[in-house]
Image (cartoon, rainbow, N blue to C red):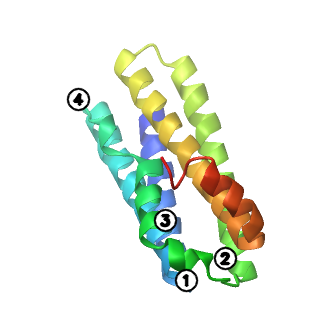
């Protein structure tokens, strides 16, 4: 299996995991967040297939932080209500952060090792999106485990841009 095929496999595993997380969470904002990120991962698969077929891909279509900004803006009042989270939801976020960290490391290594400019560009796009996904999960974890920290996040740009 080559590095692009590995990327496709990793991204599909992420789609499956985030879709299951969305199905299991009771928090409607959490559902939207997981589904939005699953859509990003589906786009990554499409891009990877294009790269594998030596076709151009469109990296600009994913905007994780902008998507989350919209979700939080539309649901800010709901989010400000004290919502208790379950251990399962927090564990799902911990697993999501680990998956994103592992993906970032893998894609950094792949980018460093490939001589192909198109693959380098592809991995650079993936790294950027995965770093944003990690930040989203990390900040969501902070909100659910201690909403006071979320207000600092709110002031640092996710809701304001």
Front one among 80 and 67: 80
Q: What distance separates the C-alpha of mark 2 from that of mark 4?
A: 37 Å
Q: Exactly how many numbered labels are in the figure?
A: 4
Q: Position of residue 22 (x, y in %)?
A: 49, 76
Q: Which residue is mark 4?
A: 56
| Looking at the image, residue 43 lies above or below residue 14 | above
Front one among 32 and 106: 32
User: Measuring 40% from the left and 24% from the top, which residue is drawn there?
Assistant: 121
Check if mark 3's residue and mark 2's residue have beta carbons within 8 Å: no
Q: Secondary structure at mark 1?
A: helix
Query: Residue 118, located in which quarter of the rendered image?
Result: top left
Q: Counting other residues with Cα less than 10 Å from the Cα at mark 2, is it few (<14), some (14-19), or many (20 or more)?
A: some
The answer to whether residue 16 shows anywhere in this view is: no
Task: Please report whichever mark, 3 or 1, sits nearer to the chain's N-terminal start.
Answer: 1
Task: Please report whichever mark, 1 or 4, sits nearer to the chain's N-terminal start.
Answer: 1
Q: Secondary structure at mark 2?
A: helix
In the displayed structure image, the side of residue 151 where residue 18 appears, left or right: left
Query: Residue 142, located in which quarter of the rendered image?
Result: bottom right
Q: Which residue is mark 3?
A: 72
- Discs 3/1, front: 3
């Amino acid at each position: 299996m080559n590095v692009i095929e590995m990327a496709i496999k990793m991204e599909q595993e992420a789609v499956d995991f985030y879709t299951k997380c969305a199905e299991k969470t009771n928090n409607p904002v959490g559902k939207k967040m997981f589904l939005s990120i699953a859509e990003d991962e589906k786009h990554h698969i499409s891009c990877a297939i294009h790269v594998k077929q030596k076709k151009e891909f469109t990296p600009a279509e994913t905007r994780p932080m902008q998507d989350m900004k919209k979700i939080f803006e539309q649901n800010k009042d709901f989010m400000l209500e004290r919502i208790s989270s379950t251990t399962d939801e927090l564990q799902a976020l911990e697993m999501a952060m680990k998956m994103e960290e592992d993906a970032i490391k893998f894609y950094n290594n792949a980018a460093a090792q490939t001589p192909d400019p198109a693959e380098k560009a592809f991995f650079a796009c993936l790294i950027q999106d995965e770093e944003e996904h990690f930040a989203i999960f990390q900040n969501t974890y902070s909100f659910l485990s201690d909403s006071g920290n979320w207000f600092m996040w709110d002031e640092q740009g996710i809701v304001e841009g």
